[in-house]
Image (cartoon, rainbow, N blue to C red):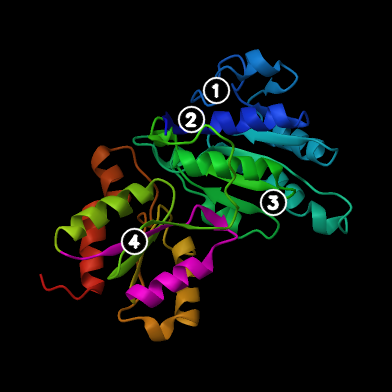
Amino acid sequence: MRTIALRQALREAMEEEMRRDPSVFLMGEEVAQYNGAYKVSQGMLDEFGAKRVIDTPISELGFAAIGVGAAMNDTRPIIEFMTWNFAELAIDQIVNHAAKMLSMTGGQYTCPIVFRGPNGSAGQLAAQHSQAFENWYANIPGLKVISTIDPYDAKGLMKSAIRDNDPVVFMESETCYGDQGEVPEEEYLIPIGKAAVKRQGTDVTIVSYNKMMKVAMAAADELAKENISAEVIDLRTIRPLDWATIVESVKKTNRLVIVEEQWPFGSIGSEIAYRIQKEAFDYLDAPVRRITSADANMHYAPNLVAAYLPDVPRTVKLIKEVMYVKK
């Protein structure tokens, strides 16, 4: 099987859906003439033209609103934000219009739109450009939320997102667009709302998503050196969340650690911990634990960036604690 980068996997998904369905179009900052800020849309203007690959002004609220209106009128827009940090300016359109349109119109209007772009930290970008927003959007009824960096998963989920009749928030990662993965050349789709068990294990379940999956997998490798078998689950979809896969894993391993790039208060891990104590409490041999970003704003200094984000040593230490491994 061929190996391609995340940016190419996302591009292929959009291209295939635009060839299949003439109502699909891409709109956002620098998506056309510049080939995308991260080169995800490279070459798409040449193939599809300026009516379907559309450069916008730096006005997130404005072009998000155009996309919502277009989605209500028999098209399927893909709206690219240069970063989800900038999408705060468009949150009214995403939350108060796209997410609520179906219910507010009594089912008369759907809003089949994909909002996509990089999310979370990307090194020394400081407080205003380093935030992870999965939990914000997952809190909104009417939205579907996808967060992945795996090229195979990203392509299959993007195609499903474009075909979905509900608004989808698609979270990527600026630091992972060059990451390589195996992606088949033939068409495939991945259903929204299904997690992936990326590594089988018996002693502890690690749940993560997006680029924190790198931390989770590396921690599992380190633990294996000490004969601790970790099962690693990539959520992929944050809303709807695949509770069954998590619960079944916890019933097998009896322990759960969540690794996420979120602030701790009201995080995705908070909700998972609640559901596990509700549905699998009798199977737990240790408290559910989580490792999150620091409860602070991201700073510019490299040492503070490192202190802010979850890492492998802290994850391994936490897992050993739930395993009651003596120091």
Q: Position of residue 59 (x, y in %)?
A: 66, 29
Question: Nearer the observer, disc 4 or disc 1?
Answer: 4
User: Quadrant of residue 292 in the image?
Assistant: bottom left
* Of pointers 2 and 1, the one earlier in the residue sequence: 2
Residue 136: % across, % down: 56, 55
Residue for badge 4: 200
Element marked by disc 3: helix
Residue 14, compared with residue 313, is above or below; it is above
Tag 2–tag 4 contact (CB < 8 Å): no
Mark 3 sits on what residue? 95
Disc 1 marks which residue?
36
Q: Is residue 245 magenta?
A: yes
Q: Amino acid at mark 4?
A: Gln
Q: Residue at x 69, y 18 (%)?
A: 48
Judged from the image, the secondary structure of the residue bearing numbered disc 1 is loop
Range shown magenta: 227-253
Query: Mark 1: which amino acid?
Result: Gly
* Quarter the N terminus occupies: top left
Relative to 273, residue 144 above or below = above
Q: Residues within 10 Å of mark 1 (few under 14, many from 20)?
A: some
Between disc 3 and disc 2, the foreground one is 2
